[in-house]
Every structure is written in C-alpha cells, then in structure tokens.
Amino acid sequence: MSQTLSTHYSICPLLVASNIAVELGWLDEEYQRVGAEAIYLRSLPDNQGWLPHFTHGESRLIRDGGAVPALWARADQADTLLVATTASQRAGQILVRADGRIRQVADLFGKRIGVPVSRNKARVDVLKALAEHGLFNALQLAGLEPSQVRLIELEDEGDPHTLQPAARPSAFWAQLHGLHGKPGQEVRALAEGRVEAVHIAAGHVPALLASGEFTVIEDLERYPDWTLKNHNGPYATTVNRAFAEQHPQVVVAFLRAAIRAGRWINQHREAAAELFTRVTFLPDAGFIRQAIAELDFVPQLGPQNLAALELKKDFLVQRGFLQNDFSVHEWARPDFLAQAHAGL
C-alpha cells in the first residue's frame, strides 16, 4: 500500500470556491482519490502557518486567495505558478464624516487621507496596498494626483500571534471575527477628526452608514471600467513550481474540488451565502447573497483576469510593494486547470 502524500493548503477568508470545497468535504475527497492528504496550513502549532501564507514558504503548499500576497510571493519570495483565478471582491469606497463639508473626492485637495500601515515588516503590507490602489483610482477620477493630498499613515495593531491552531479555515477565522469583522484604525482616526477621508472595503460600509456618523462620497463599483475594480484580485490560486512538477495530480485534485464547488455555488447562491459566513468576515448572508449574485465562481485563467493581475502587479511595483518585476502571462500555467476540467 502506497504512503499518503501529506500536503498543505491555505485559503484567505474571501469569496473563493475552494473555501466552499473545504466546507462540503470535496477537497478531502479529491485528495484522497490521488493518495494525498490536505492539511490546513494554520493547523500547524506555534503559529508556523502565518508567514508561509504570505511568502509561500512551505514547499508543498497550494494557496488560494488575495492577489497582493500571491504577486509579492512570486516577485520576491518563491518560485510559484499561477494555476487558476476567480473573480475579485467588490471595489472599495471613499468614506468621510457625515457632519463635514466634504461631498466629493475633488474636495479632498490638500486634505488628510488615512492609510493603514502594518507593524509587520516580514510580509507585504496588504491593507496599505489595497487602500492606496483604491484611493489613487478615486483621486484620478476626480482629476487629482496623490501629491495633491496628504497621506497619513495609521499603524494597525499588528497580526495576532496567540491564535489556536485549527483543522479547517472556518474554525481558524472564527477566532478573528472580533478583529477583522470591524473597521480598523483608519475609521477611528476619521471619527476623531485626525483625517478627512479613508478608503474602505465595501463589507464594512453598511454598519458605518447605519451609525449616522459617516457617508460615502465615491464608490468605485459603480463604474463600467473593470480596471477600477480589481481591489484584491482577481483572486489567485498558486503553487510552488517544484511541487507542482513533482506532484501534478495534487494540483489537479485541488482544482477539481474548486471547480466542483464553483459550479455548485453558481447554482445554489443562497446556500452558498450561508456557508460563506463561516469563512469570511463579511457582515451577514444577506450582504453575501448580494455580493455574489453576478459572480462566476468556477476557476479560470481568462485573458481579462490575467490583464487585471498584470495591472495590479504593475501598481505594486511602481509603489515599491514589489522589488522585482515579472510577466503574469509567463507565470500562468493553464495545463493543470485543463486537466481538472477534463476529468469532471
């Protein structure tokens, strides 16, 4: 009897099909078919799974989720392959105080805009990258340059290092709902008048508007221009090149599970929204149902997604988040995805 191949996987708390594949047991099922074991990266003791989620430092790792860490890992940390993408999350919004005089982005000329900054220097600063990209897009639409506003860096509380290991993403992220389920330091700075505006992810907006303290002056989702909407995406599935070449059947198994889950989500959006509440920090199933209504969750490597990743990568290079440049099209390897589709 052949020995089971132990491998790791890591999935961001985002709207990706692989999260549902785990919840429905399909990831384990597909791995078992090829003689492999899917071990959740954050099940490792002593917080060993934290940094590899960003650096792709585990040799037998498949990672699914946000584009910024995936691009950073490929540029500066590890020799990875891009084996699939899915849709991006909803674009962000520009938030101001409701009792102020700022009613359009053009009013921010010379004003202070809060930008989150992480204390952790061992990884790419994801939230800062997302905030800057969304903010700069909004400024450009209003005819402003970043140099015409004052960017105020607001340090966060840092990544928690006292979390308990968990066998599945839903159990791990449940420990963080109190931290990531609410806005960060930048909203506190806005409320206290230390800044005049912030860029914020759409998931936090309903509760903030309901408070009566804040209002939105720009929503990048409302534009037909898709290049404004690649907030933290397209979401990317990546794997270490050496592992993929030595064990292609495991990569195909992961993608098969994600494809099955993606098809299921597309056909059962209400049930999927309920499951996504376990593995994301979004407000509730109602918000998620609205967010996923038009999204296709089946993994793909279409030209628009690759172009969006190239644009995201270019921004990260220009702003100094990435030290090395590379070609997204050369990074992408469609053969694993083709095999996964062919086997279903």
Image: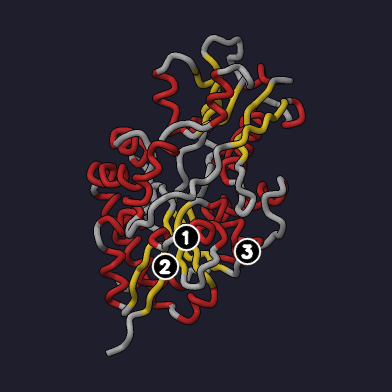
Callout 1 secondary element: loop
Question: Which residue type carries mark 1?
Answer: Gly
The 10 Å Cα crowd at callout 3, few under 14, some 14 to 19, many 20 or more, is some
Q: Earlier in the sequence, mark 2 or mark 3?
A: 2
Question: Residue 49: which numbered mark, if any?
Answer: 1
* Rendered residue at 47%/46% (across/down): 88
Whether residue 226 sits left or right of residue 282 in the image: it is right
Measured as percent of width and height from the top left, residue 317 is found at: 70, 51
Place residue 36 in its image quadrant: bottom left
Place residue 44 in its image quadrant: bottom left
* Rendered residue at 26%/54% (across/down): 264
Q: Earlier in the sequence, mark 3 or mark 1?
A: 1
Question: Residue 77: which numbered mark, if any?
Answer: 3
The 10 Å Cα crowd at callout 1, few under 14, some 14 to 19, many 20 or more, is many
Question: Residue 309: which numbered mark, if any?
Answer: none
Whether residue 47 sits left or right of residue 266 in the image: it is right
